[in-house]
Image (cartoon, grey):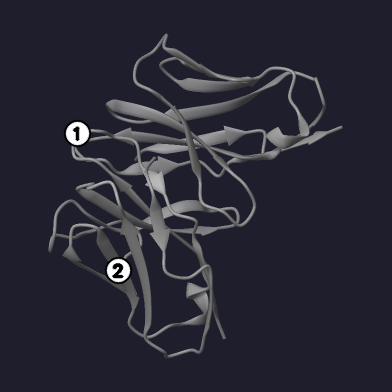
Amino acid sequence: EDQVTQSPEALRLQEGESSSLNCSYTVSGLRGLFWYRQDPGKGPEFLFTLYSAGEEKEKERLKATLTKKESFLHITAPKPEDSATYLCAVQAGGFQKLVFGTGTRLLVSP
Amino acid sequence: DVKVTQSSRYLVKRTGEKVFLECVQDMDHENMFWYRQDPGLGLRLIYFSYDVKMKEKGDIPEGYSVSREKKERFSLILESASTNQTSMYLCASSSGQGRTQYFGPGTRLLVL
């Protein structure tokens, strides 16, 4: 069974304090790993897709990396507006079904 | 920009009522999805559709049905709402070739 585990469940940072969120996965035949950002009461907002080990993607203060067993979302010099829940999902098998982790709640204090 | 809209942001219904949640996408996407999101459980797939009039069960289809009569519209139906269906419902769409799913704003449903 495909599984996704995110850690930590919650993370509190000071503005400017860099850190990383982890997404560990167990799938048979990874077709893609996805990162989303979700603000309270809203739908997930797409951030990145990674397809193969060694791949990296960047967007502003965020950088996503992928290995054969896990992905990291690195946040460099975060700002309060980066506060949100970050969701990781994997796609495996023959269709576009996503399996989601339960997310990491990030709070960045000024 | 991909736009996925959902008919209501908040809904309050009574136990036993029939509930319709609608989702519309404007990107001519072939695939559409319905998820529910609960604290501690993450997003779980209820149903998906890869073409008009086609549907497939996801991980938790019990108590739900879907309808896709037009390519841009995907409806989720709660035949007889129960309190354990109180949740955040999220619709998503993706293109046939692409893999990225784009989500709507969600409908928070409360069943009393």
Picture layout, residue B47 above or below residue B20:
above
Please give the name of the residue rendered at 25% of the width and 33% of the height, measured from the top-left corner. Answer: B98
Task: Identify whether B81 is placed above or below B105.
Answer: below
Farthest residue toward the right? A110
Residue A12 screen position, x and y as percent? 79, 34
Quadrant of residue B2 within the rendered picture = top left
The image quarter containing residue A2 is top left
Question: In the rendering, at what x and y percent does residue A1 appear?
Answer: 34, 40
In the picture, the quarter occupied by the N terminus of chain B is: top left
| Frontmost residue, A80 versus A66 | A80
User: As drawn, is A36 to the left or to the right of B57?
Assistant: right
Q: Which residue is mark 2?
A: B75
Query: Is A10 located above or below residue B15 in the figure?
Result: above
Residue A107 coordinates in the image, percent (x, y) = 76, 38
Total numbered circles = 2
N-terminal label among 2 and 1: 2
Residue at the image position 18 percent from the left and 57 percent from the top: B71
Q: Which residue is mark 1?
A: B97
Q: Chain of mark 1?
A: B
Residue at 51% across, 89% down: B14
Instruction: Tell me: A6 left or right of B3.
Output: right
Work out how far the residue at label 2 is from the one at label 1, CA to CA, in angstroms: 23 Å
